[in-house]
Amino acid sequence: MKFFVDTADVNEIRELNDLGLIDGVTTNPSLIMKSGRDIREVTKEICDIVEGPVSAEVAATEYEAMMKEAAVLAKIADNICIKLPLTLDGLKACRALTSDGHQTNVTLCFSANQALLAAKAGATFISPFIGRLDDMAIDGMELIREIRQIYDNYGFETEILAASIRTVNHVREAALIGADVATIPASTIKALVKHPLTDKGLEAFLADWKKTGQSIA
Ligand code: E4P
């Protein structure tokens, strides 16, 4: 399973990239707003840090305008993945951009039928939003399960990018179901390492090691 970090904060991205833990980045208009930076400038900086796909989202809602914005975003770097909303115009833009050789990420997916349409439009990634469904008392993980089955039934190559991940259990469940990628907030990626028995075990090993009086280096 690939990990993307869901942020436009370059410090978080640099730290996780240096740890070797991330395969890409996703941003969205809300995350760009939170960064307080110009989209072109911050996206370029992110693309210089991370080798894998960096999703940058169009803000237009009509096909022609989406294509113009996509052309601007695509020029930022070779690893830009154009993020498009799951609308008819977004799907049309997805087909055109994919045919032109661009990577695409169709976002704001909340149903299996929407995911089916994105795959038919040739999307590189489909982004089903788990947390936002859970917020409405609908099981977001069930959507990942349905999309996995549909894509496997027909051999679609579109990768399932589990999004709107809020907890470490979301990551585990998405991995068990077979999501290809998870886009995760930086704090949740770091929380994956935590286990009290690891801390306890390390403490005991270090105490015993001290008693040996040895050094390795
Ligand atoms: C995905 O690409 C989105 O940027 C993100 O996962 C949305 O998460 P949220 O529902 O926590 O805003």
Image (spheres, rainbow, N blue to C red):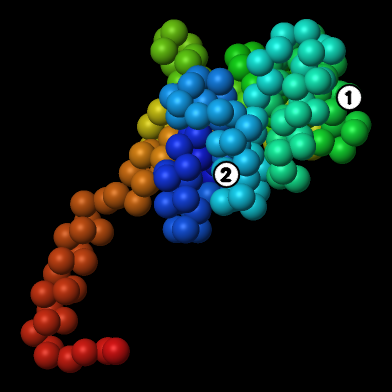
| Callout 1: SS | helix
Q: Label 2 belongs to which residue?
A: 45
In this view, which residue lies farthest toward the left? 211
Residue at the spot x=14%, y=69% of the render? 204
Residue 105 drawn above or below residue 89: below
Residue 203 in picture, x, y percent from top left: 15, 66
Residue 200, can we see it?
yes
Q: Label 1 belongs to which residue?
A: 96
Callout 1: CB less than 8 Å from ligand 1: no
Residue at the spot x=59%, y=29% of the render? 39
Residue 83 in picture, x, y percent from top left: 68, 26
Q: Residues within 10 Å of mark 1 (few under 14, many from 20)?
A: some
Q: Is residue 211 left or right of residue 11?
A: left
| Callout 2: SS | helix
- Residue toward you, 61 or 192: 61
Residue 197 drawn above or below residue 47: below
